[in-house]
Amino acid sequence: MKLRHLLMAASAAILAACATSTPYQPASKAGGFDGFSQTMIENDRARVTFGGNSLTERETVENYLLYRAAEIATERGFDHFTLAERETEQKTRLRASPGISRGLYDPYFGYSFYRPRYGWSRGYAFSRFGGFYGPRGRGYGRRGFGQRGFGFGPSFGYDPFFDDYDVREITKYRATAEVKFGRGAKPANKDNAFNAREVLKNLAPTISYPEQKEG
């Protein structure tokens, strides 16, 4: 029971640490899903990207891209910018994890894969006893024969907790746009043209920055 409680506490700590949306910060790599990045194409043109984690809403990702474009504009002495080839990419995958009733965390539990012609596999799970089980309960593990098909694993390859896992869909967004900067008043009658200073002023209250570490 002590081991189970320790594992539950560790899992809860990991989830708590990850349970925040991506703040406004530089990405760890160009085009990453953890912040903004940009590439200058010409002196007055850049490609700007902002990607967020699964807790970052699409609207937030798109607003952060606008905010970064406005920052670049003012930093380089421009007054407005125009967005071209703007798109928001949606990346979705499935994640399987042990059911809440088990209270155990297994980093290998619920492996699945995607094939274009067949879609998602039904998943493969590792037994808590050390065996490996396929979609129909066939076991492959350390020793013995499976009760539900040919295979290996302690306890004759059968895991009573085999079906006790949760599957959820995880979606992340990444907004990208080619940005053209300009001086003077923004072009009239263009919905994709923005006054850089007004964007900074209006979106500033919605921007969430990384927490500053003490010491």
Image: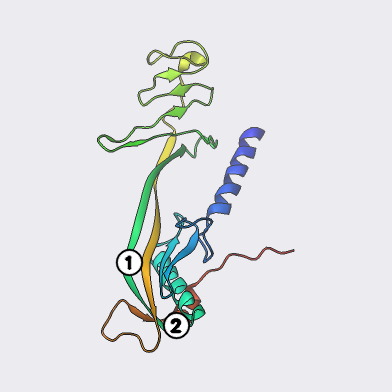
Residue farthest along the right direction in this orientation: 215
Which residue is the site of mark 2?
A: 78
Q: Of the residues under marks 2 and 1, which one precedes in the sequence?
A: 2
Vertical placement of residue 157 versus 47, above or below = above
Circle 2: residue type: Phe
Vertical placement of residue 74 versus 45, above or below = below
The x, y position of residue 163, in whole percent, is: 41, 30
Position of 106 compared to 86: left or right? right
Q: Which mark is residue 52?
A: none
Indicate the colouring scheme: rainbow
Q: Indicate the quadrant where residue 116 lies.
A: top left
The x, y position of residue 104, in whole percent, is: 55, 35
> From the viewer's perspective, is the residue at label 2 or at label 1 nearer?
2
Circle 1: residue type: Arg
Position of 8 compared to 214: left or right? left
Kindly identify the residue that appears in the image at 38 percent across and 32 percent down: 123
**Image quadrant for the C terminus?**
bottom right
Badge 2 marks a residue whose secondary structure is loop
Mark 2: few/some/many CA within 10 Å (<14, 14-19, 20+): some
Residue farthest along the front direction in this orientation: 42
Q: Indicate the quadrant where residue 96 lies.
A: top left
Q: Nearer the viewer, residue 116 or 203?
A: 116
Q: Which mark is residue 86?
A: 1
The x, y position of residue 110, in whole percent, is: 44, 34
Q: CA distance from mark 2 to mark 1?
A: 20 Å
**Image quadrant for the N terminus?**
top right
Vertical placement of residue 174 versus 110, above or below = below
Position of 188 compared to 33: left or right? left
Kindly identify the residue that appears in the image at 38 percent across and 72 percent down: 179
Mark 1: few/some/many CA within 10 Å (<14, 14-19, 20+): some
Badge 1 marks a residue whose secondary structure is strand
Kindly identify the residue that appears in the image at 43 percent across and 80 percent down: 199
